[in-house]
Image (spheres, grey):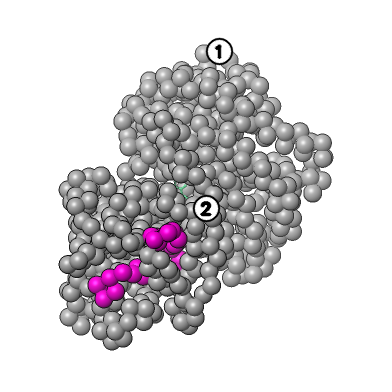
Amino acid sequence: MCGICGVVSNANVVNDLFFGIKQLEYRGYDSCGMAIINGKGLVAPKNIGSIDEVDRKEDFHQYRGNVGISHTRWATHGSVTQKNSHPHLSQNQQFAIVHNGIISNFRDLRQQLINEGYLFSSETDSEVFAHLMDRHYKLYNNIEEAIAASVKLVEGSYAICLLSVHDPKTLYCIKNESPLVLGIGEGTNYVASDFYAFVKFTRNAVILDDREIAVVSNDSYYVRNADTGEIKRKNIFTIDWSVETSQKGGYPHYMLKEIYEQPESLTKAFLTPDIEFTNFADILTKAKEKYFVGVGTTFYVAEYGKYFFADFLGEFCPAISSDEFNAIAKTTKDTAILCFSQSGETYDTLQAIKKVKDSGGKALSITNVMGSTMARMCDATILQKSGPEICVISTKAALSQMALLSFIGLEAAEKMAKISTSEKEKYVSELKALPELISKLLNERSGFIHSVAKKYADEFNWLFLGKGIYYAVAQESALKLKEVAYVHAEAMPCGFLKHGTIALIDEKFHSMVFVPHHDEECLFKHTMSSVEEIKARKGATVGFHFGTNVPEGLFNDQIVLPEETTKMQAPFIQLVAAQLFSYYVAYTLKRDIDKPRNLAKSVTVG
Ligand code: G6P
């Protein structure tokens, strides 16, 4: 969503504020701004465009000050205009605020404030908070009390950081359902939506909980509960991500770097202690209803899990997109939910967890961000240790989640006597061989995949066909192509094609086929029939397959994947190949690969 950074220091803060929002740009990038207190009062340059574009217009670095806030926006309320960019100032310019989240009752609050004589200069929900601060400061003459009084009136999710000319050496912040972390440095302290903003400067972080107010100066901070006023003791934790891993390291894009990091990120995921898989398997096998939940890419991880559990356990565990979870999932104290989330902050997925917890059920998660809201809300969490995923398009995080889910599934299958211990060990060793196989794929097939992608880069309509677990791969691969290349791709189970969509097929229409591993005879046979149906209607086809049993000349073009791949490994190998295909199509089309239009990596609003 939006990215927030605040810095208070005994030195000039502008460089750190700028660096902070650059690091957070993956959260939204339609406009940005800063507010800084300098000797004369508050200045707040802001404008529309990427951070570098706005810097060219506004020249952030001309300003100096020891306390400031910055913001990079992903518009929700109010279009992309300079006035709607953050920070927002109170009417008399005594407060400046930046906000991430949605103030759901802002229309009522706005009307009340207008009735009281406040003039609004933006269409945003956020601006109400600046005016509420002004109103309550006049009543209490104290910033903390003004914050506490303001948040009493505000409904929704928010992470807010503010500063005021009434206390020009301090940053104030408050959060509810949107993440906010403090960075504790020496002579300089930070507030940010996540620790990418300041990990270069300090690895010591404090995570704020809901409805906590933090008061931060350059050499101290304290945190209190907004409702009770009670001072909270907070643990400082050490961020274990290095600065280097969050840099591009010679790759043209983070997406390519992260695709190439997959052997390493899988190896790190495999270090997860077995006891964590056993614990997850225990909880899931005991539950009466169990659901796999995620959204966007992680919904397709959940889909993969659905097929995996059906195959290995003979159990139907619905995969539900977290934005629909509350509408359809029955939850009781016997429900268990396994959620997937790179960021651990996705609003829709957090809401699904809340529903399960409110019913007395169990919530489990696999996430990449230590200390995230999801990790703290769930009964148990597996940290996947993929390292920072900077590209807005998820690659390595999703692949590790699929692998971890497979370990849990195998553990559960053994526990339910669906597979023997020796079978389980065989499958585990195949999963553990994935890093080597993926390295081979990346080394040997990348150039060829690039050439196929280049050839088809001008095709703007695709069907992505799969069957069984390969349908999950087709869905995730189609999402990759849409997100990064802005090319329409509709994923469909092979068997569904003939029930209507086949009307689209002619010599101009392209289908990408995810051919199942030859050991999956039934899936393989049905997929082949679908390809024949397309060919009979002169449709163009491209196939991802493993060489064996695929007739010569069946596809217009084919991407042959390592023949030694096993059934267990096949979905992973196909997905990595399809990630490369999407990357190279986007590259050929000169898309903004790491920050595609309209997207944000972490959607923390509903
Ligand atoms: C957003 C992103 C998607 C991502 C989804 C889930 O919609 O644009 O790429 O897959 O959120 O994110 P999460 O952090 O929960 O994995």
Task: State left or right for residue 606 relative to residue 300.
Answer: left
Give the label, 2 or 1, closer to the camera.
2
Q: Which residue does the image show at 72% across and 33% down from the upper left?
A: 429
Say above or below: 567 vs 476: above
- Which of the two discs, 2 and 1, labels the residue nearer the N terminus? 2
In the image, the residue with mark 2 has its CB under 8 Å from the nearest atom of ligand 1: no
**Residue 176 within the magenta-colored segment of the rendering:** yes
Image quarter (top left, top right, bottom left or bottom right) of the C terminus: bottom left
Task: State left or right for residue 40 relative to residue 139.
Answer: left
Amino acid at the residue labelled 2: Ile
Q: Which residue does the image show at 40% across and 71% down from the upper left?
A: 215
> Circle 1: is it few (<14), some (14-19), or many (20+) Cα within 10 Å?
few
Residue farthest along the bottom direction in this orientation: 139
Amino acid at the residue labelled 1: Glu
Secondary structure under badge 2? loop
Question: Which residue in the structure is indicated by mark 1?
Answer: 552
Secondary structure under badge 1? loop
Say if residue 389 shows up in the picture: no
**Region of the chain picked out in magenta, as a range:** 164-190
**Residue 162 within the magenta-colored segment of the rendering:** no
Q: x and y percent of residue 353 in the render?
A: 56, 62
Question: Which residue in the structure is indicated by mark 2?
Answer: 239
Task: State left or right for residue 341 relative to residue 70.
Answer: right
Marks 2 and 1, Cα distance to the nearest angstrom? 52 Å
Say if residue 302 shows up in the picture: yes
Disc 2 vs disc 1: Cβ atoms closer than 8 Å?
Answer: no
Q: Which residue does the image show at 74% across and 59% down from the upper left?
A: 286
Q: Which residue does the image show at 35% across and 41% down from the upper left?
A: 596
Mark number, residue 185:
none
Q: x and y percent of residue 195 in the render?
A: 45, 54
